Image (cartoon, rainbow, N blue to C red):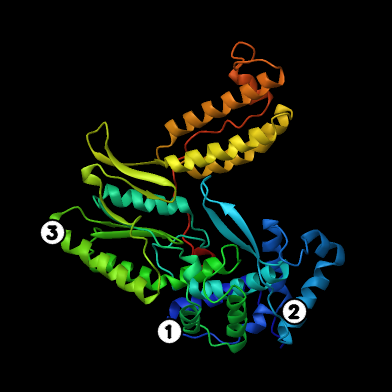
């Protein structure tokens, strides 16, 4: 009786279930699944959906599709099967950080390399996802930054008001390849897959994982998983029923640890801080001491996490509650981006300018529309409307903002200026494992 081939979705589910059931199992025979056309097609669709720029070879999605996607993927498969595939160096691009003078170096792999990375990720992700900890949220299936923010807010409600706020120095640039490959090898016993991973890492330099690589987020989470394990152990060791003394949340290299406010927990603050530094030292990850600090919310202090500024406020019911809203730095960066658009298209029709600024506003507001962002949103909305009014008045060679000439309603209903500034209550999403476990 001929056995039907296993689908990619079923394969990923079975890999996750096996990895979850046997934490020490090392997987073999993975390379054949990476090379399957089904896997490569899915990896291509993932890359295509992002519609990214071409890599160092200049090959675009349009050129690939003109020549035939199946032909393109067939060539990649042949190279993988014959062990002749070699990744190209990534194209480097500088991206401004928060509207300031500092830049982040984005690495843009060639599309062929994005497909191979994507195929590897499709096969390896469910294996390592089974090992990742509850407090890790960055770039994981069905996990969001909003969930990480909500986890922190809940911990503050539970009186975990002493904060260890650590900033890592150039984390992605300093990942040690040998240590990373050791972590992969604990779960993967496949020479061909390990060879592919080594080539990909070598193409980026002597150390580091490129920001922009398809598989980089999986690597960055795997590299810090032992830190997460240590923190999860601290949560469980200090658990008393439903109550714990420690909580944490991590999104990529942005992390925060919250510890109980009681004086009896003083030792915990010192112990967790010491253990964190020990774990980071093992990984050769440097801590930026200038930006890292201890925060006590009971003393009126605040801290930042994932672009939000957290502090405590006294509610109308005379209860202490977390308050979190966009950092001033994030609002300033938004204004800088919008101001650049207005300056670049100063002589263009207002409808064109609005079409340019609306996606920027929508993306920014959608991210920050949780917590206590309403007053910030009001400020943003007023600022944007004034800029649009000035644009129209300049086009007519006049001063002022045209308050009598145009109503606010006209801008939003007639011109279509973005107007969805309503806050949304955060709701719990399904856990990441759901896509594999069902």
Instruction: Check disc 2 and report the residue beneath it.
Output: 77
State the residue in front, 386 or 291.
291
**Residue 240 in sight:** no
Residue density around tag 2, few if under 14, some if 14–19, many if 20 or more, within 10 Å: some
Q: Residue at x 53, y 62 (%)?
A: 141
Kindly state the secondary structure of the residue where label 3 is placed. helix
* Outermost residue to the left: 264
Q: Is residue 68 above or below residue 206?
A: above
Judge by depth and name the residue closer to the eye, 62 or 433: 62
Check whether the beta carbons of the residues at disc 3 and disc 1 lie within 8 A of each other: no
Vertical relation: 44 (above or below) 158: below
Residue 395, by quadrant, is: top right
User: Which of the marked residues, 2 or 3, is nearer the chain's N terminus?
Assistant: 2
> For mark 1, what is the residue?
24
* The label number, if any, that marks residue 47 in the structure image: none
Q: Earlier in the sequence, mark 3 or mark 1?
A: 1
Label located before the other in sequence (2 or 1): 1
- Residue 72: where, in percent of width, then height? 80, 71
Q: Where is residue 279, by image quadrant?
A: bottom left
Residue located 46% across and 63% down the image: 170
Q: Position of residue 287 (x, y in %)?
A: 36, 64
Which quadrant is the N terminus positioned in?
bottom right
Residue 264's label in the rendered image is: 3
Residue 235 in the image, given as x and y percentages of width and height: 28, 64
Q: CA distance from mark 2 to mark 1?
A: 31 Å
Q: Is residue 162 visible?
A: yes
- Are the residues at dot 2 and dot 3 in contact (C-beta closer than 8 Å)? no
Q: Residue at x 57, y 67 (%)?
A: 210
Which residue, as the protein is rendered here, is positioned at the far right? 67
Could you tell me how far apart the alpha carbons at marks 3 and 1 are, in whole angstroms? 37 Å
Q: Residues within 10 Å of mark 3 (few under 14, many from 20)?
A: few
Residue extending furthest front? 101
């Amino acid at each position: 009786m001929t056995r039907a081939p296993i689908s990619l979705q079923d394969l990923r589910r079975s890999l996750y279930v096996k990895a979850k059931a046997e934490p020490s199992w090392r997987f073999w025979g993975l390379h054949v699944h990476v090379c399957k056309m089904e896997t490569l097609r899915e990896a291509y669709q993932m890359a295509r959906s992002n519609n990214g720029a071409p890599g160092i070879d200049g090959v675009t999605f349009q050129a690939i599709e003109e020549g035939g996607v199946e032909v393109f993927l067939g060539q990649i498969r042949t190279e993988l099967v014959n062990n002749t595939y070699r990744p190209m160096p990534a194209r480097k691009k500088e991206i401004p950080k928060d509207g300031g003078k500092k830049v982040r170096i984005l690495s843009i792999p060639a599309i062929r390399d994005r497909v191979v990375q994507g195929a590897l990720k499709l096969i390896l992700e469910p294996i390592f996802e089974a090992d990742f900890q509850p407090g890790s949220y960055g770039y994981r299936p069905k996990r969001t930054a909003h969930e990480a923010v909500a986890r922190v807010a809940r911990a503050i409600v539970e009186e975990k008001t002493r904060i260890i706020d650590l900033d890592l120095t150039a984390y992605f640039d300093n990942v040690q390849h040998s240590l990373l490959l050791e972590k992969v090898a604990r779960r993967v016993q496949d020479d061909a897959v390990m060879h592919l991973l080594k080539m990909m890492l070598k193409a980026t330099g002597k150390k580091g994982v490129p920001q922009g690589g398809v598989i980089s987020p999986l690597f960055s989470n795997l590299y810090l998983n032992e830190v997460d394990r240590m923190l999860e152990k601290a949560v469980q060791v200090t658990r008393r029923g439903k109550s714990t003394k420690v909580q944490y949340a991590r999104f990529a290299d942005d992390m925060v640890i919250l510890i109980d406010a009681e004086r009896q927990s003083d030792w915990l603050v010192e112990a967790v801080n010491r253990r964190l530094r020990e774990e980071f030292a093992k990984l050769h990850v440097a801590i930026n001491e200038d930006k890292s600090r201890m925060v006590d919310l009971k003393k009126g202090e605040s801290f930042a996490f994932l672009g939000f500024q957290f502090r405590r406020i006294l509610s109308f019911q005379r209860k202490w509650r977390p308050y979190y809203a966009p950092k001033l730095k994030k609002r300033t960066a938004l204004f800088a981006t919008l101001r650049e658009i207005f300056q670049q298209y100063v002589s263009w029709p207002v409808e064109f300018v609005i079409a340019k600024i609306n996606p920027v506003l929508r993306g920014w507001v959608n991210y920050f529309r949780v917590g206590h962002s309403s007053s910030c949103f009001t400020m943003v909305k007023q600022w944007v409307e004034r800029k649009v009014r000035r644009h129209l008045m300049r086009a007519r060679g006049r001063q002022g903002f045209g308050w009598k000439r145009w109503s606010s309603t006209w801008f939003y209903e007639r011109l279509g200026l973005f107007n969805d500034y309503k806050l949304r209550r955060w709701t719990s999403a399904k856990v990441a494992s759901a896509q594999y476990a069902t």
